[in-house]
Image (spheres, rainbow, N blue to C red):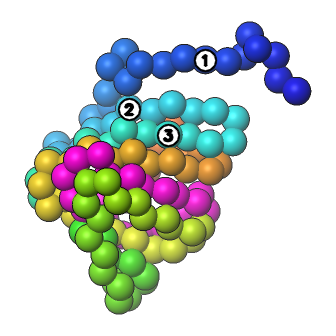
Amino acid sequence: MSDAASVRHFRWTDLPEERVTDTISRRLITGDDMMIAHVYLKKGALVPQHSHHNEQITYILSGALHFWIGADRGREVVVREGEVLHLPSNVPHEARALEDTLDVDVFSPPRQDWLDGTDSYFHKK
């Protein structure tokens, strides 16, 4: 059992905002076995196709994301404000912001590539 002293409290506005691209930024909170992120996407922002071993839940607080799912991009889903998308481990996916969007991404385990800056898929040409 963990000690009560290990409990942490955060305010999103107190966390540093990391610029990922010209149109995407994020704030992260990481626990031992999970991570939560606010991801800010300007209209038209593209998250290129990628996959990861981390299970992902994406909850749209405002805006909308158009997802292409599968290596062949064969399934399309638009996730709007108040909606949630669950992405199991290792499922290829890509997303484009249909409008300025704030999403909450939850990952288990934490995204090590986001923590150490090796998430190079954001910069594919």
Q: Determine whether 74 is above or below 124 in the image.
A: below
Bounds of the magenta segment:
47-65
Question: Which element is circle 2 on?
Answer: strand
Q: How much space separates mark 1 and mark 2, taking CA atoms? A: 16 Å
Horizontal side of 5 relative to 19 (left or right) equals: right
Q: CA distance from mark 3 to mark 2?
A: 9 Å
> Which of labels 3 and 2 is toward the front?
3
Q: Earlier in the sequence, mark 3 or mark 2?
A: 2
The residue that label 1 is drawn on is 8
x%, y% of residue 55? 58, 60
Instruction: Please identify the dominant SS of the magenta region.
Output: strand
Q: Is residue 54 magenta?
A: yes
**Residue designated by label 2:** 27
Instruction: Look at label 2 and name its amino acid.
Output: Arg
Can you identify the residue that label 3 sits on? 36
Q: Secondary structure at mark 3?
A: strand
- Give the residue type at disc 1: Arg
* Amino acid found under the numbered disc labelled 3: Ile
Helix, strand, or loop for circle 1?
Answer: loop
Say if residue 87 shows up in the picture.
yes
Pointer 2: residues within 10 angstroms few (<14), some, or many (20+)?
Answer: some
Residue 117 visible here: no
